[in-house]
């Protein structure tokens, strides 16, 4: 069975090099041997006369202003970041300061290289729709120069029937701004336990912190540590580890006037410095107000780490590390609700097997229960999930991916017991979606891959990345998919 059930839609999202953000640029810091040239550059800019300064600033704002929201504010911010290098900062005119900021800025095309690995959830705004329609938010992995990934979004309307309308994605992009976060003590405890960091300094800090605390309270506690503890051989190293562990949690928000496709979740911590990859979004409903949750992979250029985010509205986001043996690899996907009071997730802790992990009382994801190992010819290298489980009357539908000869990725499906998700009850005996001639070529050839779909009006809607180059959409009748699955009970 290959692509018999899945119907590809004729809508495709392709990388748009016009989608750019403004980043800080410091001459010299991109060299193999770092030697900042900031001071000399600022002096040269400061040496321009007023007429030349005004002309250059006006020309720069005219040239780039329509591509960005409040570009002058960005220039001012970048000036503030480097003004300590300016010998005569108090003497610079407002125009000179903005021009200095312009010289320390550059555009970065967030999806110049690729656009892939989407997930799909119901949009926060369901107004102005006709019968049979559902507005959805599509998360996207955007890849730019240097293989740097960020998380972007698109909006679309499904239905009626197989109709799919994607909202135009034009307009200036906005990177989320850091906001104050209320840190969780239990997450700090879990992070310290993961590194086996337990001494008198950490014990004293944890005893002084409340369940929720802000950055100022954290620093007050560190500043109040007894000198006798800090003078111990491990004292300063422990302080550094506490700060690094605590910094893994942060919050970011976007202006209310921005629309979803203008928002970019940009790497904001050292652990994410080389990318935020493969976000798997799910709308979590558990007897309270629905909230968006997601997992993603943070990459620092050497190692990966699994991160979680939560958002009430896809405008305010809070990011936190995930801890424990169940989340030590890529491909973690949260269930959309608790099951029997338990928080569960799919994972691939060993790199090749789909497993089920549970969050314990100490906020650590436990060693996984194996669900599905490489088995069929199209998945013998490894298997993993393609997003969060989808609840159906028949069970939890899990879209899977498998890797076969020539590192060819294809998508399949499993069905888990609704009350006992550790039991596989059925599987699709073959492939649901595989690379065709039209989508096998790209940034990473021979790949179809999804980070999550949803069911609307009896149809499974599945966005997918085609060869890590563009995003396509496919639909599958749920009744036909469930009918095609075969019993796979082992007991």
Image (cartoon, rainbow, N blue to C red):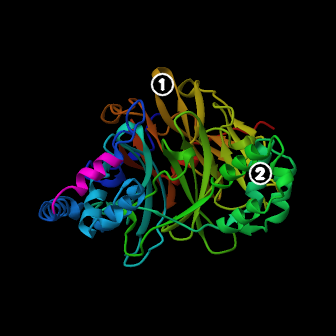
Tell whether label 2 touches label 1 (CB within 8 Å). no
> Label 2 crowding class (10 Å Cα cut-off): few <14, some 14-19, many 20+?
some
Coordinates of residue 205 in the picture (x, y in percent):
81, 58
Q: How far, Cα to Cα, is label 1 from label 2?
A: 36 Å
Q: Residue at x 15, y 61 (%)?
A: 49
Residues 341 and 410: in front is 341
Residues 225 and 274: in front is 225
> In the image, is 48 to the left or to the right of 485?
left
Which label belongs to residue 407?
A: 1
- Residue 113 is one of the magenta-drawn residues: no
Q: Is residue 214 visible?
A: no
> In the image, is 483 to the left or to the right of 197?
left
Residues 118 and 427: in front is 118
Q: Which residue is mark 2?
A: 190
> In the image, is 259 to the left or to the right of 206?
left
Coordinates of residue 90 in the picture (x, y in percent):
35, 66
Coordinates of residue 370 in the picture (x, y in percent):
74, 37
What count of labels does the image hold? 2
Residues 132 and 200: in front is 200
* Dot in front, 1 or 2: 2
Tell me which label, 1 or 2, sits earlier in the chain: 2
Secondary structure beneath disc 1?
helix
Coordinates of residue 161 in the picture (x, y in percent):
38, 62
> Label 1 crowding class (10 Å Cα cut-off): few <14, some 14-19, many 20+?
some
**Residue 92 position by quadrant:** bottom left
Q: Which segment did they paint magenta?
A: 39-49
Q: Residue at x 51, y 70 (%)?
A: 313
Identify whether 180 is placed above or below 238.
below
Identify whether 388 is placed above or below 165.
above
């Amino acid at each position: 069975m290959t692509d018999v059930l899945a119907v590809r839609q004729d809508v495709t999202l392709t990388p748009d090099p016009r989608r750019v953000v403004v980043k800080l640029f410091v001459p010299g810091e991109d060299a193999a041997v770092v030697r900042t040239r900031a001071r000399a550059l600022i002096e040269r800019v400061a040496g321009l006369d007023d007429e030349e300064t005004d002309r250059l600033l006006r020309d720069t704002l005219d040239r780039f202003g329509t591509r960005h929201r409040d570009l002058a504010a960005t220039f001012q911010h970048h000036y503030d970041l480097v003004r300590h290098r300016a010998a005569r900062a108090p003497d610079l005119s407002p125009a000179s300061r903005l021009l200095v900021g312009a010289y320390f800025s550059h555009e970065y095309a967030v999806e110049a290289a690729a656009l892939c690995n989407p997930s799909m959830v119901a949009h926060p705004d369901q107004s102005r729709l006709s019968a049979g329609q559902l507005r959805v938010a599509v998360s996207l992995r955007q890849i730019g120069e240097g293989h740097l990934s960020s998380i972007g979004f698109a909006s679309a309307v499904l239905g009626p029937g197989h109709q799919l309308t994607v909202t135009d994605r034009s307009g200036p992009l906005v990177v989320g701004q850091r906001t104050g976060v209320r840190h969780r003590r239990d997450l700090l405890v879990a992070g310290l336990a993961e590194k086996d960091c337990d001494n008198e300094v950490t014990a004293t800090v944890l005893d002084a912190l409340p369940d929720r605390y802000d950055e100022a309270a954290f620093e007050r506690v560190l500043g109040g540590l007894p000198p006798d503890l800090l003078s111990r051989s491990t004292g300063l190293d422990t302080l550094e580890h506490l700060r690094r562990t605590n910094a893994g949690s942060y919050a970011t928000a976007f202006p209310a006037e921005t629309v979803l496709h203008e928002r970019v979740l940009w790497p904001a911590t050292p652990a994410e410095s080389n990318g935020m990859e493969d976000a798997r979004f799910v709308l979590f409903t558990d007897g309270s107000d629905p909230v968006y949750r997601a997992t993603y992979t943070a990459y620092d250029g050497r190692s990966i780490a699994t991160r979680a985010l939560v958002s009430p509205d896809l405008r305010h986001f809070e990011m936190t590390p995930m801890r424990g043996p169940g989340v030590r690899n890529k491909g973690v996907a949260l269930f959309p609700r608790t099951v029997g009071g338990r928080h569960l997730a799919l994972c691939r802790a060993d790199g090749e097997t789909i497993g089920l992990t549970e969050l314990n009382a100490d906020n650590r994801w436990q060693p996984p229960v194996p669900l599905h190992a490489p088995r069929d010819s199209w998945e013998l290298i490894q298997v993993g999930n393609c997003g969060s489980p989808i609840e159906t009357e028949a069970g939890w539908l899990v879209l899977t991916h498998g890797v076969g000869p020539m590192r060819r990725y294809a998508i399949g499906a499993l069905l888990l017991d609704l009350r006992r998700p550790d039991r596989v009850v059925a599987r699709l005996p073959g492939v649901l979606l595989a690379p065709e001639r039209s989508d096998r070529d790209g940034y990473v050839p021979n790949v179809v891959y999804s980070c999550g779909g949803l069911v609307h009006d009896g149809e499974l809607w599945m966005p997918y990345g085609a060869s890590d180059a563009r995003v396509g959409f496919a639909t599958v009748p749920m009744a036909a998919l469930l009918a095609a699955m075969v019993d796979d009970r082992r007991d």
